[in-house]
Image (spheres, rainbow, N blue to C red):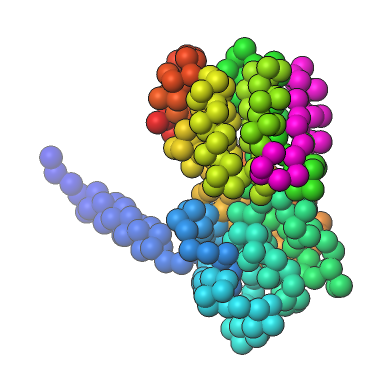
Amino acid sequence: MKHGRSGYACVWARLILFVMAVCLSLQPVMGAEEVHVTVVESRTIGAYDLALDGFTNVMNDKGFHPTLTRYVVDVDVNTPKELRGIVESTHSDLILALGTSAAKMVKDCNCGIPSVFSMVSEPAQSGLLNSGGDGGTPMTGVCLDVPVHEQFASLVDVVPRVRKIGVIYNPDESQFIVDEARKAANRMGLGLVTHPISSEAELPEGLTALRPHIDALWLVSDRTVLTTQSLQYVFLYAFQTNLPLMGLSEHFVKMGALLAVGPDFTDVGRQSGEFAAQILKGRDPEELPMASPRKVMLSLNLRTAEIIGHRIPDGVIRSAASVY
């Protein structure tokens, strides 16, 4: 097949346009803004790395190219005053706090720059949502706490016969969680049976009192209940009495809980990046309500199900993110 001069010119023009498009795709996005982010971490764990991946990806998508400088509490930075000096000397544009202790340090440092928290538990009870000024650095962000109604919905999916859910807790530690759970259970047509304790020594008696009245046991984030010794007793008791146990995270499922629902850490980081982008564009952190994880993952322990004589529906097993 023969080509005239016009045909060759057309081919060359297309080739040049293709090469130009490839070159442009390799260039930084025009108008993208370079920002320096000071990252303060409560400790060094893989979950924070996942959150940072999500954070960085969203920031890039939103037109910000973040340079991250990471500091671990009690390793690289020890006091709010020390953190304030770091932020001032590095001319940071934003602080990202990963974990509750890191967020508290950022709150107390009053650094005067936009700050976002991520991967924290119970931010309101930790004082992170107070206003600025005397209340510390204004902050918003994303917590790790899966809404109670989502936890209970997953529990009913895994154990459809559940009607009464039991919980043991210390009112001084987690009354607010139990109050929220009671409202959620009522809305769902479920019953919440509670047993308050003031010390871990009261846990065995509490479990014995609850067992005849409940179909499943729900663990809450409570330092009185979640001691190493108490947890060992709870797991053993659940096995011995064929009691479905819902833990706080995948870690509890690995230990022997029947199920748990937890956040997708990468997506929590993405949510935090979305907050950061809005703030860097001029939004006041106090105008942005704190968010819960929008993407949660179900973990199941099929060996535990076998031990307690419970069959999990096949569809639920297929929907789980982790199965043990």
Give the quarter of the image for residue 202. Answer: top right
Where is 186 relative to 29, above or below? above
* Quarter of the figure with the C terminus: top left
The reply to whether residue 78 is in sight is yes
Q: Position of residue 226 (x, y in %)?
A: 61, 45
Does the magenta portion include 133? no
**Lateral position of residue 198 relative to residue 3, left or right:** right
The reply to whether residue 153 is in sight is no
Q: Position of residue 213 (x, y in %)?
A: 71, 18
**Lateral position of residue 122 relative to residue 19, left or right:** right
Could you tell me which residue is drawn at 78 percent across and 60 percent down? 127
Give the quarter of the image for residue 275. Answer: bottom right
Could you tell me which residue is drawn at 45 percent across and 25 percent down? 304
**Lateral position of residue 321 relative to residue 183, left or right:** left
Q: Position of residue 31 (x, y in %)?
A: 57, 68
Could you tell me which residue is drawn at 81 percent across and 36 percent down? 179
Could you tell me which residue is drawn at 84 percent across and 68 percent down? 135
Closest to the observer: 185 or 208? 208
**Lateral position of residue 151 relative to residue 109, left or right:** left
In the current view of this chain or complex, which residue is farthest to the left? 1
Which range of residues does the magenta coloring cover? Answer: 179-202
Where is 307 relative to 78, above or below? above
